Image: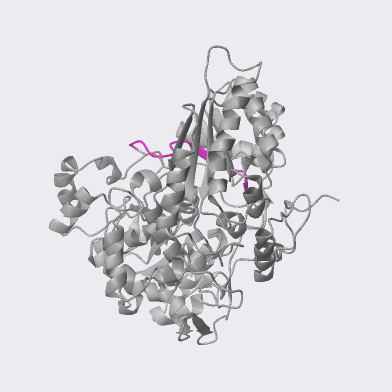
């Protein structure tokens, strides 16, 4: 009766294509052949989740295993949620329409701390107990992975297990282990204990956390012989790693509706605020011929006429000119455009400009991150003003007239003078356009300066730093606005309230679980959406639980404090992070990994190998 109920309501909700499945490239299987059913849940809308490369990779990988069926699940929009509750329709997989409470695994990807409330919403709609301790043998195993799993503690009470790092190899090991347990007298507790001994798997219920009188952590103690420290997993050989030949092609527009080809993992730069740059170390590159083949396969199977070369810093790919040369041999003929996101200011050459002119149009985006050189040195951006202006001049010579610059407000040691320099640097870019004799004729320039709020994150050199209070951020945003001197410059900024809550959960511990549960009861959901976010409701939840959120967001930590994530190992050593933090306080920079190895320790995860290593 589930499908009949759905057919009655789909014409009454926005974008029914979010809820029907059956797209080209989606995978259905016969239940008679299936041993494991996996619900891959993205805790946001269909349009956002369907744009995520990690979900595409794991969806294809899981379904390549003959007796595993992976289905997609997204957070229903509020109109659909209302109908589902009214008609008692439990959350279901798009491929089968079956309730996911019947599945073996319900997996969530943790891309953003403000999606945590949607995880509880989805479990509630699925009719699965929110707290892991309340689940029985009849309930699915709730597993989480993704970048936010690096600090699993704020949602540890709701999750049965976390997968740390990259999921391709460890997932197959977990499936084999589950099949073994399922074939006998299945015990949820026995399976979780066995899973906790698989490298890369963290089962929080097997770890006890105690606290000191001042609220800091006294100890994290492992039980039943499970590892004291859980190490993340990585894929060592990117050329032979699984990558799908096909994507599910959506019925409706999604955020990034294009083919995506991953060119490498990791980053050589070491920007001290950037969590992804440390979490995904060591650097591992794919060969140009592999990337070229995968890109062409995807465009051929899906019909997409655009392919995006995905990485944390595309211009740092060592064989980029060679790759673009190979791809242009077919992309121009097939009328496929190539986009290069995440370009570095110091990686934009005249040679690259010529190739980009053939493969993309529109504006260019660069991320100086800070307006002043002193602050760029603090954060180890290793970009100088003259490099940015030279790069913009090269872009203007190539015909570009629209530049977007990304900055951050609230960085450690920042002053109001540093904030004003955001507009000062933007003005220098405008001036560079009008002083350029080769600028496009008859056109003006547009420079947009976008300033997000700094959030201190685990496994970065700034994990010990406090976040500026909301009041201070607001003062800096006002100062930014009044520092604009040209109509050619547009400034915008990120909401400070949401960044505050992001910081709370980024550096939080298990005592935040009751807060999250109370916020769910108060109706918090889609907290990453300005239309839904309410700091007042969250503050009500904090007050009810007698938790001060400033303890997590606005407090400086000492090097000897036990951090909530210290028992999780992402490869980069704490000693290295401390060294980098101390250097930041002196505005001292560290060379990128290709210039000199700084001994972060992440190569231990790859047998001592790192593709960023300095050539002999």
Please give the range of residues in magenta. 251-265
Give the tally of numbered discs: 0
Q: Position of residue 100 (x, y in %)?
A: 30, 61
Q: Which is nearer the eye, 52 or 535?
A: 535
Residue at x 58% of width, y 21% of height: 333
* Residue 69 appears in the figure: no
Residue at x 35% of width, y 54% of height: 30
* Residue 366 appears in the figure: yes
Q: Main secondary structure of the magenta part?
A: loop
Colour style of the rendered protein structure: one colour
> Relative to 100, does residue 45 appear above or below in the rendering?
above
Residue at x 63% of width, y 36% of height: 292
Where the N terminus falls, by quadrant?
A: bottom left
> Relative to 54, does residue 436 appear above or below in the rendering?
above
121 with respect to 435 (left or right): left
Q: Position of residue 379 (x, y in %)?
A: 63, 53
- Residue placed furthest toward the right: 616
Residue 255 on the magenta span: yes
63 with respect to 583 (left or right): left
Q: Position of residue 429 (x, y in %)?
A: 59, 30
- Residue placed furthest toward the top: 442
Residue 532 on the magenta span: no
351 with respect to 219 (left or right): right
Q: Position of residue 347 (x, y in %)?
A: 68, 37
């Amino acid at each position: 009766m589930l499908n009949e109920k759905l057919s009655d309501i789909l014409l009454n909700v926005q974008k029914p294509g979010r809820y029907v499945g059956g797209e080209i490239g989606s995978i259905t299987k016969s239940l008679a052949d299936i041993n494991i059913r996996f619900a891959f849940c993205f805790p946001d809308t269909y349009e956002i989740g369907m744009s995520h490369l990690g979900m595409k990779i794991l969806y294809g990988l899981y379904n390549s295993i003959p007796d595993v069926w992976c289905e997609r699940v997204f957070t229903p929009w509020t109109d659909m949620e209302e109908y589902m509750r009214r008609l008692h329709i439990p959350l279901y997989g798009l491929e089968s329409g079956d309730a996911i409470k019947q599945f073996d695994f319900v997996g969530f990807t943790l891309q953003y701390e403000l999606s945590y409330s949607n995880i509880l919403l989805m479990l509630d709609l699925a009719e699965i107990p929110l707290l892991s301790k309340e689940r029985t043998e009849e309930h699915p195993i709730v597993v989480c992975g993704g970048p936010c799993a690096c600090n699993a503690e704020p949602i540890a009470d709701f999750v049965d297990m976390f997968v740390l790092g990259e999921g391709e190899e460890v997932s197959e090991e977990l499936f084999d282990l589950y099949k073994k347990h399922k074939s006998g007298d299945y015990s949820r507790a026995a399976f979780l204990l066995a899973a906790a001994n698989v490298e890369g798997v963290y089962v929080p219920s097997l770890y006890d956390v105690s606290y000191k009188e001042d609220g800091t952590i006294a100890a994290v103690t492992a039980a039943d012989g499970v590892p004291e420290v859980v190490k993340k997993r990585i894929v060592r050989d990117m050329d032979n790693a699984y990558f799908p030949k096909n994507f599910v092609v959506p019925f409706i527009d999604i955020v990034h509706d294009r083919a995506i080809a991953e060119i490498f993992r990791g980053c050589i730069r070491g920007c001290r605020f950037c969590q992804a740059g440390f979490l995904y170390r060591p650097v591992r590159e794919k060969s140009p011929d592999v990337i070229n083949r995968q890109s062409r396969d995807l465009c051929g199977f899906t019909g997409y006429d655009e392919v995006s070369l995905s990485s944390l810093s595309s211009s740092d790919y060592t064989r980029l000119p060679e790759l673009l040369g190979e791809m242009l041999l077919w992309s121009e003929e097939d009328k496929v455009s190539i986009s290069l996101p995440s370009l570095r200011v110091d990686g934009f050459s005249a040679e690259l400009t010529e190739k980009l002119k053939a493969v993309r149009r529109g504006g260019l985006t660069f991320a100086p991150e800070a307006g002043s050189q002193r602050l760029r040195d603090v954060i180890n951006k290793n970009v100088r003003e003259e490099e940015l202006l030279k790069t913009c001049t090269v872009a203007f010579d190539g015909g570009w007239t629209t530049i977007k610059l990304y900055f951050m407000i609230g960085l450690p040691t920042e002053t109001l003078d540093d904030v004003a320099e955001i507009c000062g640097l933007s003005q220098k870019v405008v001036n560079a356009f009008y002083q350029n004799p080769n600028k496009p004729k008859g056109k003006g320039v547009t420079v947009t300066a976008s300033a997000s709020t700094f959030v201190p994150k685990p496994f970065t050199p700034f994990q010990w730093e406090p976040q500026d209070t909301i009041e201070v951020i607001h003062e800096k945003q006002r100062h930014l606005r009044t520092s604009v001197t040209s109509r050619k410059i547009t400034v915008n900024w990120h909401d400070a309230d949401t960044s505050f809550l992001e910081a709370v959960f980024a550096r939080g511990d298990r005592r935040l679980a009751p807060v999250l549960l109370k916020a769910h009861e108060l109706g918090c959901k889609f907290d990453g959406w300005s239309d839904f976010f309410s700091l007042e409701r969250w503050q009500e939840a904090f007050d009810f639980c007698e938790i001060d959120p400033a303890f997590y967001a606005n407090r400086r930590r000492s090097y000897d404090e036990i951090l909530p994530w210290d028992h999780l190992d992402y490869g980069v050593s704490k000693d290295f992070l401390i060294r980098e933090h101390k250097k930041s306080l002196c505005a001292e920079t560290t060379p990128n990994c290709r210039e000199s190895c700084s001994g972060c320790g992440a190569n231990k995860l790859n047998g001592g190998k790192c593709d960023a290593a300095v050539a002999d």
